């Protein structure tokens, strides 16, 4: 636990925590240790964590740009990334999976429409025999939807099922971008849905006149006040014509009228309430094939492309400006991980200039101003590449290749703005970092790392032992970081820094009814907290953690059927804001210990590592901080041994601090897989209560599977 925390084993089942409040040179608690990571990530087979659209956005429709869908192959291409699969049986099975996850009425309707030339998620409605579809070319040179309606017996066209955030608003706004072979009048409407999936009563509609050239027309739809706003109520959106029409649809966007610059307002509110300090974006694996220029400028000029790393497509509706607006709405600092896979140093430099350049003196700054944003975004942190050591990355490379890319990228980027911080893509487990330190140490200050250890868990595995192994991982990783810091200093780097830019559980059940600590559960909150504690103890070397993730990815915030809720880990990050810019105080701990015997995740690749057996790990992980705002002393206690019972813990404050009162804040779950769900979104949330203090001493019971905070208020 390093010098900030000392430990003596005890065998009486109780614990004592002594805090030196007289220390005046405590370790600074950097807010960046509580950052988050969000990726444009759309996956198959993750239960409700599956995305088919960007969870950051308030966009209500799937495939709103009528794109050609990418069904991801499970396996890497030779040059990296995950290409599309074209096997009809696999595609049919994949669509069935989409329908199951999203709780839509049936897969056959979507599959048949897709096979007949309709963009996935859309299907013919009305007089279906009068509807013919085929692919075409849109405003950005990407796929659009040709729609031919021939003498329909009723209003006919295309529709799709959707869920709506009617618990918040009944008002919607959007745009239709389309053209006609001849002028036509289209209707955009929202409907009820019958039990068999057909469109029912029209609840709101508007008409749009379409000319012979592409035009974007805005519209509004207001549903009745008595509309069913239950969470499972399914609706549909349609675009139809009552008479013969021949049109090409480029995009149909639909947002609730309470969106925050197109972002989901509940997601923004949850992150704002948690005081999120930093957000890393847009990847992740995604970024190794991402062209930032696709996501800037007018929406109609942004092409939809296959997601380079994951299932589905990237609409580019949420690009650089939307990300910056999102961060401004949340109140956090933006951090960009850029494409050092298929991207070039020149691409990266232009992105820096687009974000930070003067509009009057730089080409890209002027382009940003032309796009309506004259003030620079002032992005400080730029991560050069994501996991480009791995063959799952588009245009992966070797250790020497990484050093070469970093040198060229950094030189080009800092020539544009020498005030930025450039983070080198790192890996603690191999010789990956060595060429950076040997070839360009004078250019390196930050090295990144990812801790993503895990594998499938079967009925033969001991889940409790697995949990305990995870709870001790942070301290062993920190030993590896100590070695890395020493090597960086030996290379001549005076103030080296490490950024842990991805962190999460990767354990998953291989069979039903196998209890597993997952990223959505209380276990992830405790796991993340152990890394924050070790980072604080690193004396400033580990200065940044962007925990995975946001938007149905990792342990953060979940979105399903347009309802949004936080995982337990989200609430831990909210608790973290009390520690921002505080001073960590020395702690002496006496408590029981635990061991494990099994090595886990031994079949994963060498870049990710494994969970080794644990010997003599303290059952409690304490951290004491004098807060910056009001000088309170906060003591956080993580119970790391799921096989032990509650631990009665005495906290003693040594020094000049005089405690007048104390409160406890407890984040805990009854089981290691306890989580918040669509049905019960506040199942695991913090609870607060008063705690008696006598002569600067308090006793608290720390339950298993909990983070227990005691806040001492000064007299």
Image (spheres, rainbow, N blue to C red):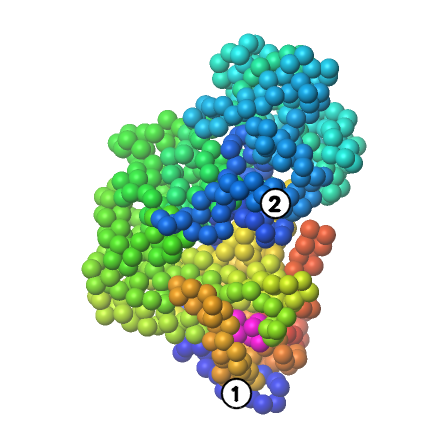
Residue sitting at x 31%, y 33%: 364
What secondary structure is the stretch in magenta mostly built from? helix
Q: What residue is shown at x 67% (from left), y 37% (from top)?
A: 108
Judge left or right: residue 143 versus residue 660.
left
Whole-number angstrom distance, CA of label 2 to CA of label 1: 54 Å
Residue 89 - label:
none
Residue 491 visible in the shown view:
yes
Answer above or below: position of 48 versus 151.
Answer: below
Residue sitting at x 27%, y 47%: 409
In the displayed structure image, the side of residue 85 where residue 59 appears, left or right = right
Label 2: how many residues lie within 10 Å, few (<14), some (14-19) or many (20+)? few
- Which of labels 2 and 1 is toward the front? 2
Which of pointers 2 and 1 lies earlier in the amino acid sequence? Answer: 1
The image shows residue 392 at horizontal and vertical percentages of 41, 53
Q: Is residue 18 magenta?
A: no
Name the element at disc 1: strand
Please name the residue that numbered disc 2 is placed on: 93
- Residue under pointer 1: 9
73 and 627: which is toward the camera: 73
Magenta span: 465-470
């Amino acid at each position: 636990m390093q010098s900030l925390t000392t430990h003596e084993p005890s065998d009486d089942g109780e614990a004592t925590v002594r805090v030196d409040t007289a220390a005046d040179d405590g370790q600074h608690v950097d807010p960046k240790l509580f950052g988050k990571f969000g990726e444009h990530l759309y996956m198959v087979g993750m239960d409700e964590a599956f995305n088919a659209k960007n969870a950051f956005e308030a966009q209500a429709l799937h495939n709103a740009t009528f794109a050609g869908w990418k069904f991801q192959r499970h396996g890497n291409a030779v040059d990296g990334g995950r290409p599309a699969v074209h096997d009809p049986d696999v595609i049919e099975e994949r669509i069935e999976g989409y329908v199951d996850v999203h709780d839509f009425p049936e897969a056959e309707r979507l599959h048949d429409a897709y096979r007949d030339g309709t963009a996935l998620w859309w299907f013919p409605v009305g007089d279906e025999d009068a509807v013919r579809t085929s692919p075409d070319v849109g405003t950005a040179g990407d796929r659009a939807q040709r729609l031919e309606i021939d003498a329909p017996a009723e209003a006919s066209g295309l529709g799709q099922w959707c869920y709506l955030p009617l618990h918040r608003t009944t008002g919607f706004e959007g745009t239709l971008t389309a053209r006609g072979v001849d002028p036509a009048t289209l209707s955009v409407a929202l409907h009820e849905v019958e039990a068999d999936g057909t469109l029912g009563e029209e609840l709101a509609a508007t008409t749009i006149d379409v000319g012979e050239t592409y035009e974007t027309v805005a519209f509004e739809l207001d549903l009745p006040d008595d509309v069913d706003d239950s969470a499972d109520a399914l609706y549909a959106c349609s675009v139809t014509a009552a008479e013969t029409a021949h049109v090409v649809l480029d995009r149909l966007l639909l947002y609730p009228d309470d969106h925050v610059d197109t972002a989901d307002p509940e997601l923004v509110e949850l992150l704002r309430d948690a005081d999120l300090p930093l957000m890393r974006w847009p990847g992740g694996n995604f970024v190794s094939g991402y062209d930032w220029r696709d996501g800037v400028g007018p929406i109609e000029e942004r092409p939809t492309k296959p997601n380079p790393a994951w299932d589905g497509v990237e609409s580019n509706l949420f690009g650089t400006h939307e990300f910056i607006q999102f961060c401004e709405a949340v109140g956090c600092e933006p951090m960009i991980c850029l494409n050092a896979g298929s991207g070039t140093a020149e691409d990266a430099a232009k992105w820096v200039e687009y974000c930070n350049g003067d509009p009057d003196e730089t080409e890209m700054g002027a382009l940003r101003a032309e796009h309506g944003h004259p003030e620079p975004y002032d992005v400080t942190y730029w991560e050069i590449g994501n996991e480009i050591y791995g063959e799952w990355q588009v245009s992966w490379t070797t250790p020497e290749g990484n050093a070469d890319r970093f040198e060229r990228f950094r030189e080009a980027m800092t020539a544009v703005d020498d005030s930025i911080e450039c983070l080198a893509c790192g890996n603690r487990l191999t010789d990956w970092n060595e060429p950076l330190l040997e070839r360009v140490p004078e250019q390196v200050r930050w090295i990144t790392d990812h801790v993503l250890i895990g594998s499938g868990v079967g009925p033969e595995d001991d889940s409790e032992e697995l949990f305990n192994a995870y709870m001790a991982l942070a301290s062993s990783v920190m030993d590896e970081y100590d070695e890395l810091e020493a090597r960086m200093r030996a290379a001549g780097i005076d103030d080296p820094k490490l950024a842990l830019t991805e962190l999460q559980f990767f354990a998953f059940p291989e069979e039903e009814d196998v209890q597993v600590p997952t990223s959505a559960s209380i276990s992830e909150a405790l796991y993340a907290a152990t890394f924050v504690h070790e980072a604080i103890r690193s004396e400033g070397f580990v200065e940044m953690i962007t925990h995975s993730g946001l938007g149905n990815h990792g342990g953060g915030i979940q979105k399903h059927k347009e309802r949004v809720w936080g995982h337990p880990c989200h609430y831990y990050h909210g608790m973290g804001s009390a520690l921002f810019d505080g001073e960590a105080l020395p702690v002496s701990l006496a408590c029981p210990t635990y061991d494990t015997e099994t090595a886990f995740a031994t079949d994963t690749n060498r870049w990710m590592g494994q969970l080794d057996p644990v010997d003599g790990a303290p059952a409690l992980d304490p951290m004491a901080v004098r807060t910056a705002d009001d000088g309170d002393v906060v003591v956080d206690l993580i119970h790391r041994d799921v096989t032990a019972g509650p631990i009665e813990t005495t906290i003693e404050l040594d020094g000049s601090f005089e405690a007048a009162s104390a409160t406890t804040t407890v984040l805990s779950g009854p089981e290691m897989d306890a989580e918040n769900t669509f049905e019960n979104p506040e199942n695991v949330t913090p609870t607060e209560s008063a705690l008696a203090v006598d002569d600067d001493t308090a006793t608290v019971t720390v339950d298993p599977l909990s983070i227990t905070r005691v806040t001492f208020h000064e007299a």
